[in-house]
Amino acid sequence: MNDQTEDDPQPPGTVRLAVLLVAVEALGLLIVAAVLAGLAFVHTSNRLWAALAIVGFALLGGLVLAACARGLLRLRPSARSPVVLIQLLALPVGYSLGVQAGRPLAGVPILLLAVAVLVVLFTPSARAALDRLR
């Protein structure tokens, strides 16, 4: 017997993969926010407010990505646009960190995750699942 109803369709594998990748990005940003918050309070800084602003942006980004991952999992088409926008913004960040700044351990994962999410979200099955009107 199938518990699945027409009102509650299951996401295809490509969307589930996108959810996983976006959740990894969200977790990464939340970890970065926690580490930066700890460093801001441990080290003496003349600009504590600036350090906390960066922590706030990382925290906000992580929460937005987590909410978008949840929306993708529920096949909400409105979750796709913010994810695509964030990935497009992550591409130059990853390139700048990984190539121009010479920090490949920071930039390459950002770059690879962004490309992977974009590729997965634009597969035919993901597009078909997320293009439905809700």
Image (tube, rainbow, N blue to C red):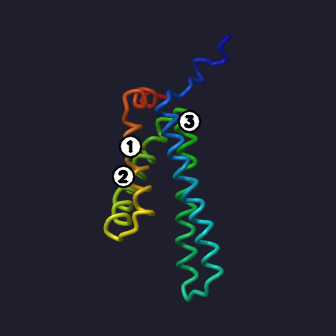
Q: Earlier in the sequence, mark 1 or mark 2?
A: 2
**Which label lies toward us, 1 or 3?**
1
Q: Could you say which is closer to the camera, residue 36 or residue 52?
A: 36
Q: Secondary structure at mark 2?
A: helix
Query: Please, what is the three-letter code of the amino acid marked with disc 3?
Result: Leu
Q: Are marks 1 and 2 in contact (CB under 8 Å)?
A: yes
Residue at x-position 52% and y-position 52%: 25
Q: Residues within 10 Å of mark 2 (few under 14, many from 20)?
A: some
Q: In the rendered structure, which disc, 1 or 3, sits on the residue that comes first in sequence?
A: 3
The quarter of the image holding the N terminus is top right
On the image, numbered disc 1 is attached to which residue? 118
Query: Which label belongs to residue 88?
Result: 2
Vertical relation: 1 (above or below) 95: above
Q: Which residue is rendered at x = 54% and y = 59% of the image?
A: 29
Judged left or right of residue 67, residue 80 is left
Callout 1 environment at 10 Å: few (<14), some (14 to 19), or many (20+)?
Answer: some
Q: CA distance from mark 1 to mark 2?
A: 8 Å
Amino acid type assigned to the residue bearing label 2 in the image:
Leu
- From the top left corner, tell me how far across and down residue 34 is, in percent: 63, 66
Residue 37: x %, y % from top left: 62, 72
**Which of the 4 image quarters holds residue 92?**
bottom left
How many angstroms separate mark 3 from mark 2 (CA)?
21 Å
Dots 3, 2 in contact, CB < 8 A: no
Q: Which residue is mark 3?
A: 73
Q: Confirm or deny contact between disc 1 and disc 3 (CB under 8 A).
A: no
Q: Secondary structure at mark 3?
A: helix
